[in-house]
Image: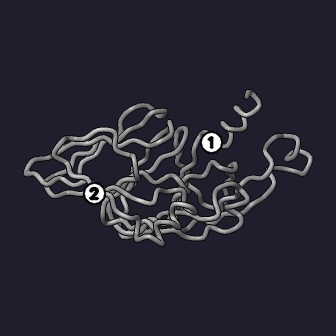
Amino acid sequence: MKSEIKGSQAFSYVEVELAPDEVIVTESDAMSSMDADIELKARLNGGLFKGLLRKYLGGESLFVNHFSNPTNTPKKMTIVQGTPGEICHRKLDDEVYYLQPGAFIACSPGITLGLEFAGLVSFISREGLFRLKMSGSGDLYFGAYGALLEREVDGEYIVDSSHLVAYEPGIKLKLQLAGGIFSSLFGGEGLVTRVEGKGKIIIQSRSITGLAGWLNPKF
């Protein structure tokens, strides 16, 4: 499967070329356009019970879409995400990768979308009580509101609440005040996530929570 991420950081989209008999799995409503010969089949996201869990605990839809190319020639389609922001591509090779709720956009059929308890630290830091566990081999596409920034962690790193998007299994999350009690309360930072371990993380430059906080007083 060939793919290319296009557009600006604010409005990224993915151009996908499906070879004959190739399939791509997408989040519900991720397709914005496609060749007329491409076939669509909506399926429960891992069965009814698991699909319900991922919908209400993992921020994903109950159904996922399977797009396939039944012809003898390559066909193209365009994939987008629901919020303005950047899309990232990662190639998994029989490994595990964690996404925050709502970040998943699309993947190859060889990748399994699961749900895993993330811990109270993740919940308190507004990252979600559960996280999406992506496992297997293939192409993975995910995104978030704002630009996506990659950071290499070898030790400790501080991420503001609701800004962590994705991370590798070697990363652990802890919660702490941004500074002293006075500075944390009156400096506007409050609680932050202390990322510990070795691996890469993806953070978003903006957050929906921050946008909502900025908009609410204006209404």
- Quadrant location of residue 76? top left
Task: Kindly state the secondary structure of the residue where label 1 is placed.
Answer: loop
Residue 184, above or below 33? below
Separation (CA) of disc 2 from disc 1: 32 Å
- Quadrant location of residue 116? bottom right
Amino acid type, residue under disc 1 in the picture: Ser
Task: Kindly state the secondary structure of the residue where label 2 is placed.
Answer: strand
- Camera-side residue of 107 and 181: 107
- Camera-side residue of 88 and 77: 77
The C terminus: image quadrant: top right
In percent of the image, x 29 and y 38: which residue is there? 33
Q: Position of residue 120 (x, y in %)?
A: 71, 67
In percent of the image, x 70 and y 32: which residue is there? 215
Q: Position of residue 163 (x, y in %)?
A: 63, 48
Left/right placement of residue 179 relative to residue 29 reads right
Of label 2 and label 1, which has the lower sequence position?
A: 2
- Camera-side residue of 122 and 208: 208
Left/right placement of residue 183 relative to residue 129 reads right
Q: Position of residue 4 (x, y in %)?
A: 31, 42
Amino acid type, residue under disc 2 in the picture: Lys
In percent of the image, x 10 and y 51: which residue is there? 71
**Residue 139 visible in the current orientation:** no
Q: Residues within 10 Å of mark 2 (few under 14, many from 20)?
A: few
Left/right placement of residue 157 relative to residue 43 reads right
Tag 2 and tag 1, C-beta contact below 8 Å:
no
* Residue on which the image places disc 2: 41
- Camera-side residue of 190 and 33: 33
Q: Position of residue 21 (x, y in %)?
A: 15, 58
